[in-house]
Image: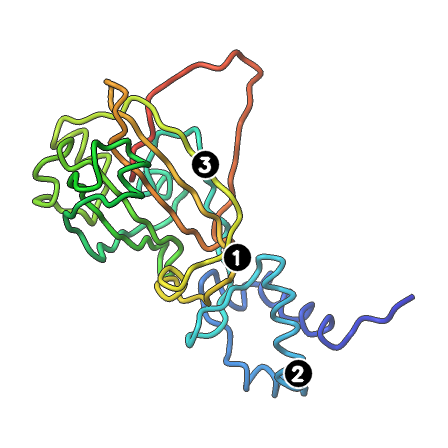
Amino acid sequence: MTQPSEADRISDIILHDIDRQVWSADQPLPVERLLAGRFHCTRVTLREALQQLEAQGRVYRENRRGWFVSAPRLRYSPASIDGFMQYAASQSRSPRTELLSAFEQPAGPIFAEQLGLPGADTPVVILKRRRWLGRRAVLFEINVLRASWCPDLLKHDLQGSLSVIFGERMGLHMSHSETRMHAGSLPAEPAQLLFGRRGMPCIHIQRLSRADDGQAVELDCEYWRADALEVVVTSDGKAPRTGPSRASG
């Protein structure tokens, strides 16, 4: 029988410490120098052990910040009409939205095609936001909205829930949406904002939402750290039915 490697032995000890709650969720592990000293190993061997735990979803790494104990993944249902703030809070997490930029500009050819706009010069509102769970940045989001559908949107506080702004403050509603998702890798901007590295695994979610008249009004592009999200789909065996759209949270 193959003997466990030194990295296997170290990862087992660290995992045992995590299970005994020596370190709690989102708490930093000791720096690599101290851990390597504790286990009398090289930092190369230590990183191999930590990478094993990272692959298991038990720890995560942030650039220039070190290693941290993973909290449970956030459960996400594509069929839910709740936004990020609502479904994160329902799972006893502490969600926060950070507005990075908000501006109006001509759509350009790509957004015009995706939203079915009359032309590339049609105005759209673009929001860039970073989403947090506790101390951890887990999601970079770009919302592209048909400006004529949501006039004066930029006058509102956009660090909260968009669905609340649309429904309760602006009287706007989306009738349905189409959600697509796939495994991908983080581009440069999301990687930097999520304290990751360019090319690291991510879950990319794109949602196109429509108003009651069938007009596409919002394109939502999300880049999630792959180690922070769990996609859950529930099937009850009943005939499919249409329902309200899930607006951006």
Q: Where does the C terminus fall, quadrant-wise?
A: top left
Mark in front: 1 vs 2: 1
Whole-percent x and y of residue 242? 40, 16
Sort mark 3 into few (<14), some (14-19) or many (20+) by Cα contacts within 10 Å. Answer: few
Mark 3: secondary structure: strand
Residue at image location 25% in from the left, 42% down from the top:
144
Q: Earlier in the sequence, mark 1 or mark 3?
A: 3
Residue at image mark 3:
180
Residue at image location 44% in from the left, 63% down from the top:
26
Residue at image mark 1:
201
Mark 1: secondary structure: strand
Q: Earlier in the sequence, mark 3 or mark 2?
A: 2
Question: Given the image, on which type of amino acid does mark 2 rest?
Answer: Phe
Q: Earlier in the sequence, mark 1 or mark 2?
A: 2
Residue at image location 75% in from the left, 77% down from the top:
6
Residue at image location 50% in from the left, 81% down from the top:
31
